[in-house]
Image: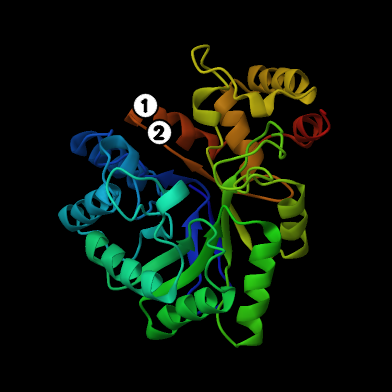
Amino acid sequence: MRYRTIGTDPATRREVSVLSLGAMLFGSATDEATSYAILDRYVEDGGTFVDTSDNYAFWVDGSQGGQSEELLGRWRRSRGVGTEIVVATKLGARPLAPGTSYTDNAEGLSAKVIRESAERSRERLGVDRLDLLYAHIEDRTVPLEETVGAFGELVAEGTVGLLGASNHRAWRVERARALAAAAGLPGYEVLQYHHSYLHRRPDLPSALDPDGDPGSAGADLLSYLRAEPDLALVAYSPLLKGSYTRPDKPLDPAYDLPSAPRRLAALREVAAETGATVNQVVLAWLIGAELPAIPLVGASSVAQLEESLAAVDLDLTPEQRARLDGTW
């Protein structure tokens, strides 16, 4: 396994594995025994960065979520896991009532919600401090000053370490970080967005924003990250839910761009040259990019996880990387 540091403050920064494990469906669609086996294998291989949310997975059974955090709490206790494993969670997108959705009935990012939701997440996970806490989605009904101040209070109290944002417009992230800096408060240091090798159309309306998908790492966000090298990018759904390799998982229409056939061909060429799978080339491309990302991979079996773990040791040559980067 390889590692990198996220965060800049010596009091809160953490060294994490360059491959993060998503626990979204653990405890719901993925049963407990399988979830434990995947987590155990990930840790055995040196993995130290597990991702969840307080609303995972509300859509499976029409609940409000929390099953993933609860399973991780049970797993941590059963294995004696301590601070060596960094668990990231999110708040702000938990449905306020069973049977509803975050798209129209989310808990939001008020000071009250942030404090109460963070406390419930700590209880479910069985920890005194949340290593990394994300604002899961935007909440434009609450002043950013209130959200920034509430997160800052939790860090000051020692119940939260690092702060992050997911599915936010780049300008909202920058505005929040500027407000935090002006107030002498900690700001977002980790950004979690959908990011993969194939380009994605940024203009298609989404459930969160009629102007397009705020959860994809588009040109504005990538440009912002290049200007702020201390920020870390965590890339969720890097393997497009199987669409790179499974005929029964066609690509989403958002990837129907002129560059897609050429980039897919380049991926297959490099995979053939290296003896790796296409998925492994995608993950290696993300990890070793000029603007590196930490891929966040899901797995419903140990075998799926094994494929992703092997990508960490795949070193693409400068020529292969230039070929992949230069295909438009």
**Rendered image quadrant of residue 313:** top right
User: Residue 309, percent across and down?
Assistant: 46, 37
Specify the amino acid type for callout 1.
Ala
Q: Residue at x 58, y 36 (%)?
A: 283
Label number found at residue 13: none
Query: Label 2: which residue?
Result: 305
State the quadrant of the C terminus.
top right
Whether label 1 touches label 2, CB < 8 Å: yes
Front residue of 244 and 182: 182
**Rendered image quadrant of residue 197:** top right
What element does badge 1 sit on?
Answer: helix
In the image, 160: left or right of 82?
A: right
In the image, 187: left or right of 132?
A: right
| Colour scheme | rainbow
Q: Residue at x 75, y 25 (%)?
A: 257
In the picture as drawn, the residue positioned furthest to the top comes out as 247
Specify the amino acid type for callout 2.
Leu
User: Residue 223, percent across and down?
Assistant: 78, 55
What element does badge 2 sit on?
Answer: helix
Residue 230 shows in the view: no
Q: Residue at x 59, y 20 (%)?
A: 275
Residue 309 shows in the view: yes
Front residue of 205 and 278: 205
Tell me if mark 2 has few (under 14), some (14-19) or many (20+) residues whose alpha carbon lies within 10 angstroms of its own: some
Query: Label 1: which residue?
Result: 303
Q: Is residue 291 above or below residue 154?
A: above
Distance CA(mark 1)–CA(mark 2) = 5 Å
Q: Is residue 227 above or below residue 111?
A: above
User: Residue 215, percent across and down?
Assistant: 59, 47
**Rendered image quadrant of residue 8:** bottom right
Front residue of 182 and 227: 182
